[in-house]
Amino acid sequence: MVEPLIRSSEAVEYESVAAADGLRKGVLIDEGDGAPNFAIRRFVLEPGAEVPKHTNDVEHEQYVLEGAYTVGIDDEEYTVSAGDALLVPAGTVHWYRNEGDQPGAFLCAVPNGDDTIELTE
Amino acid sequence: MVEPLIRSSEAVEYESVAAADGLRKGVLIDEGDGAPNFAIRRFVLEPGAEVPKHTNDVEHEQYVLEGAYTVGIDDEEYTVSAGDALLVPAGTVHWYRNEGDQPGAFLCAVPNGDDTIELTE
């Protein structure tokens, strides 16, 4: 039996992400809360943040919450800003860079289960 | 082979939702885009919007994007505001009401597959 949950923004704990300078991650809802299929997390990309080229075993569905920053997928770079949505398929090389002077933030949903992050540079 | 996708906020199409006055729904990413496991949608709750008590066959994981509004789950009502996250388990009675003078907006993720919406009042 899964219980309903309301988690206020103040109750979300953020941690640094290894190998990604200036990236912070907060879990909003995941398996630990009883979520049966997928998790939603909020990431903050500080000005100057760089997340190197990598792949994941699982897809990402993302929504840009704040700011504007660079996302690379395969061989292309894009500038995304608040309101844009992204699908990064499993196994696809991707990276992030915030060259602005304002933080960027995005929501990232992933399926439950194990994920391996592989750096590709 | 799933292709990467970036959907700008301007490219999202919104439609009214039957039986829910003042609620609009825009699909950000779903099965039609090749998303293998779940969809993300953005909902706008206009001032005065009322979404009646109902259940869904699937869980919702939500993130409040804008404004403040009332969410009812089971027998309780809560005021949520931007930054809050919610887990509404499958089969749980829930409803929404925006009594403010500003629109509310939230992201709602659901697993792929059929969903039946059942009104409970």
Image (spheres, coloured by chain):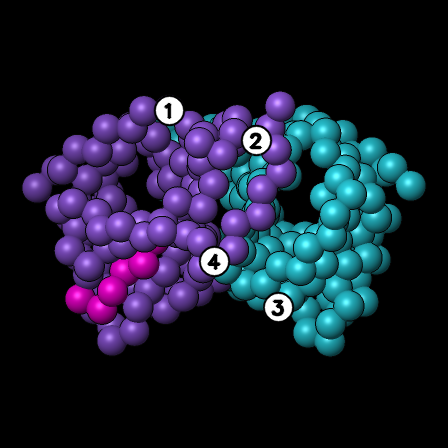
Chain colours: A cyan, B purple
| Residue hosting label 3 | A67
Q: Can residue B1 be seen in this snapshot? A: yes
Q: Alpha-carbon distance for marks 3 and 4?
A: 13 Å
x, y percentage for residue A89? 64, 33
Image quarter where the N terminus of chain A lies is top left
Q: Badges 4 and 1: C-beta atoms under 8 Å apart? A: no
| Viewer-nearest of discs 1 and 2 | 1
x, y percentage for residue A73? 72, 44
Numbered circle sitting on residue A111: 2
Q: Which residue is drawn at 54% across and 63% down?
A: A82
Q: Alpha-carbon distance for marks 4 and 1?
A: 25 Å
Residue type (three-letter) at the residue carrying disc 2: Pro
Label 2 element class: strand
Asked whether the residues under marks 1 and 3 belong to the same chain, the reply is: no
Q: Earlier in the sequence, mark 4 or mark 1?
A: 4
The residue marked by circle 4 belongs to what chain? Answer: B
Report which quarter residue A80 is drawn in: bottom right
The residue marked by circle 3 belongs to what chain? Answer: A
| Residue hosting label 1 | B113
Report which quarter residue A2 is drawn in: top left
Numbered circle sitting on residue A20: none
Residue type (three-letter) at the residue carrying disc 1: Gly
Q: Badges 1 and 2: C-beta atoms under 8 Å apart? A: no
| Residue hosting label 4 | B9
Q: Alpha-carbon distance for marks 2 and 4?
A: 24 Å
| Viewer-nearest of discs 3 and 4 | 4
Q: Alpha-carbon distance for marks 1 and 2?
A: 15 Å
- Observer-nearest residue: B56 or A52? A52
Asked whether the residues under marks 1 and 2 belong to the same chain, the reply is: no
